[in-house]
Every structure is written in C-alpha cells, then in structure tokens.
Image (cartoon, rainbow, N blue to C red):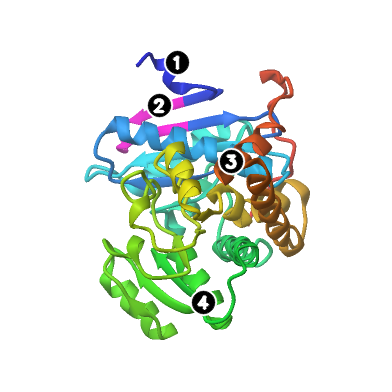
Amino acid sequence: MEMFQRLGEHEQVIAFNNNATGLRGFLAIHDTTLGSAFGGVRIWRYENDDAALTDALLLSRAMTYKASLAELPCGGGKTVILLHDGLRRQEAFADFGCMVESLSGRYFCARDVGIADADLAAIASTTRFVAREPSPDLGDVSEHTAIGVWHGMRACLEFAGISGKIRVAIQGVGSVGHLLARILHREGFELILADIDPTRVAKVAGELGARVAQADEILSANCDVLAPCALGGVISLKTVPQIQARIVCGSANNILAGPDAGEAMAHRGIIYAPDYLVNAGGLIRGAEYFMLGRSESMTSIAKIYDRTRRVLNLARDRAISTAAVADDLAESRLKRPKRFSNLTWRGNPKQN
C-alpha cells in the first residue's frame, strides 16, 4: 500500500529513532480541526514496526472521534514506543519529551499502556505538554475513564430494559478494568473477571468476590454485559458469534477489529456502546483540566450517559449500527477548514 494512502486523513506522522538511547516509535497526529491533539503514550513489545505504526494510526483516529463526540476543544494523537531489550528507558523518555516540546503544543501526551510514573516524570523533565500523575488537582484519570464507562453501561442497560441481578464479564482488570469492577461491585452486579496476568485477576477477584474465567473464554461468558477493558481488536467477525452478552460496553480502545464487526453485532441484536464514546472520561478530565482550567469534570463525564442514549436511539430509528451512528456524529464536527499555521497550543499547561 502506498504510504500516503495508508496514512489516510492523518495530518502528521513522525517516525523517531535514537540509537544512543534505543528510542524508536511513531507519533501520529490525526486531526487538529478542533484544537491540539491529545493522546497517550503506549510502550509495547510489538511484533514488528508495521504493527506499531498500525496501532498508532488506529489509536490516534479513535482519540479524534472521542474528543469530537465529547465536544472537547481538542483533536486526537497517539504515540507508540517499541519496547526492546536495548532501550535505556529513562533517557529515552527524556528524549521523547524533547520531541514533544518541539511541537509547541500541537500534541499533548499522557499515560497509556505500559507507562509507569517514572516514565511520565522523565517526559516531564523536558516538556510542558504531558499530564503527570498522580496529581491532587487532576485526579486519577483511570478513575474518570471507569466512571464514564459506567455511565455508558447504565444507558445501555436502561435502553435494553435489563434490571435485577446483572452479570458483567470484564476482560482485563488493569487500572481501568479494576476500577470499573469496583463500581459495578458497589452497584450489586455479579462479576466474571479475566486477565492475562493470573496473579492480578486472582487478587481483584478476591477483593470483590468475583468469579474468574480463563482469558480465552471470557468473550463467550454467560452474562448480560461484556466489558472489554484490555487491548483492542477483540470483537471480530470470528468472535461475534461467540458472544452471549446482550450488551458490549468497555474501556478498551478500538474494541472492533473492523467496521464489519459492528454490523455483525447489530444483526445479532447485540447492543454495542462505541468505545470512544463511553471511554472518554479520562480525556474529558485531561482536556478540561489542562485546556479549560476546570477544577472538576464529573458533570461533563456524566453526559456520556445522554450521548450514549442518543446514539442508541438514532441507531434504532435509522436501523443502522451504533458504530456507524457514532462515526457520523463525530465526523460532523470535523468538517471545518484548518491551517497548519493555526495549530498551536491554546490551553495553559500546568506543571504537576
């Protein structure tokens, strides 16, 4: 495939390489029509460079759509860093921060998969444009994400008329999945948990009195709601027939392996809450804190419930998938003309 055809509508994609520190990866800025690109930094042991680039492109696009649906004054970006044995981690992340700083606010980064507090500290040593955690003023971004997913799930349950003893199967009990499990436990839901880390899932299950399922069996669990909260691409034409849940609603980015999976769920009558609609709580908090100076964002995050109900109602009325409806709504805000010269930081980044 030709390079620019592959990049699609992305405005800017940077491939970076520093042999001195072992820093290698891709920074993808998808769209800044609405403002500077927000998006996390992910470090992962990718199979190859092509897989890393694909991940950056898909995740940055999802961030744009997430920001658009949430009516935020920002666009979407993402960084993926290749994890390998030769990486000099602290120095590499400091070098990465220098590159972020050189973009003058076109891209604002935060934590994603594989990133530790020490990594964020190293990035922050060389750039202003990073969300440091933990911060008393910012709060726990993972918690904000989990709360947003809960609002989306609540909307789906009410739309479907499901009540009583509700069973939720959660795939992945990392930071967001664990916090979502705690919320659902407080609400009296029955939980089935799975994770690729057996020690972690056993600990969370013991805390919450949940049942543990094998990681390769969780998608077919007998439940009302399936909540993918790990990596993306888990719902495909191959896995849709296995799903017993009436609702799919989770925090993972890019849950669908492709748009055909969303159509397949719609044909089966499975209610799908588009991931970039319901997992926007962390982005909402970060954008409102760093760009708008707001002290709290719970009111804004609660609006995920209303947006989810709107998407569900429109999908029913138009007889199309919720994924198609969400894409249409997000794209409607991205049709304004833009100029690269205007793409500078409009917020007021705070040092934590």
Mark 3–mark 1 distance (CA, rounded to whole Å): 31 Å
- The amino acid beneath tag 3 is Ile
Residue 23 highlighted magenta (yes or no): yes
- The amino acid beneath tag 1 is Phe
Q: Position of residue 122 (x, y in %)?
A: 46, 49
Between marks 3 and 1 in the image, the one whose residue lies nearer the viewer: 3
Whether label 4 touches label 2, CB < 8 Å: no
Of the image marks 4 and 1, the number of the one nearer the N terminus: 1
Quadrant of the rendered image containing residue 278: bottom right
Label of residue 4 in the image: 1
Mark 3–mark 4 distance (CA, rounded to whole Å): 27 Å
Q: Position of residue 292 (x, y in %)?
A: 77, 48
Of the image marks 3 and 2, the number of the one nearer the N terminus: 2
Q: Main secondary structure of the magenta part?
A: strand
Between marks 2 and 1 in the image, the one whose residue lies nearer the viewer: 1
Viewer can see residue 335:
yes
**Which residue has dot 4 on it?**
166
Q: Residue at x 73, y 20 (%)?
A: 337
Mark 3–mark 2 distance (CA, rounded to whole Å): 38 Å
**Which residue has dot 3 on it?**
320
Say above or below: 228 vs 79.
Answer: below
**Which residue has dot 2 on it?**
15
